[in-house]
Amino acid sequence: MENVKISTEFIKLDQFLKWTNVVSQGSDAKSLICSGLIKVNDEIEVRRGRKLRIGDIIEVNSKKFQIV
């Protein structure tokens, strides 16, 4: 699992995917999220504006990230 440090209270899911280089463009993030391929805390997430906070675990293509 890869730890991702944020310096704000939260980061939106689509911004997180760009920040971690999972996708290169916002449109790619939207497509990936809408396809149901992203899990947040073991639940499929389809809202690209989902606020991720410290402690959340994000799974993308079997790769896991934790917000710290």
Image (cartoon, helix red, strand yellow):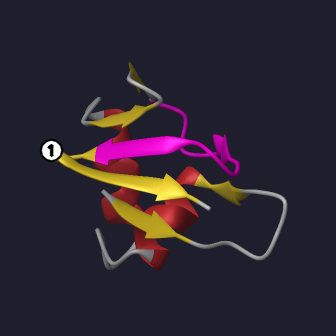
Q: Is residue 24 above or below residue 38?
A: below
- Determine the main secondary structure of the stretch shown in magenta: loop
Q: Is residue 13 above or below residue 38?
A: below
In-front residue for pair 21/65: 65
Residue, far left? 62
In-front residue for pair 7/25: 7
Question: How far across and how far down the image is residue 24, in percent?
Answer: 32, 79
Answer with left or right where residue 26 lies relative to residue 13: left
Question: How far across and how far down the image is residue 4, in percent?
Answer: 51, 69
Residue, far top? 43
> Which quarter shows the N terminus?
bottom left
Type of amino acid under label 1? Ser
Residue at point 15%, 47% (across, down): 61
The image quarter containing residue 17 is bottom left
Answer with left or right where residue 58 lies relative to residue 53: left
The image quarter containing residue 58 is top left
Residue at point 45%, 29% (across, down): 45
Residue at point 41%, 51% (across, down): 30
> Which quarter shows the C terminus?
bottom right
Highlighted magenta segment, given as a residue range: 46-59
Question: How far across and how far down the image is residue 51, in percent?
Answer: 70, 45
Residue that mark 1 sits on: 62
In-front residue for pair 12/41: 41
Number of residues whose C-alpha sits closer than 10 Å to that of mark 1, classed few (under 14), some (14–19) or many (20 or more)? few
Residue at point 55%, 52% (across, down): 13
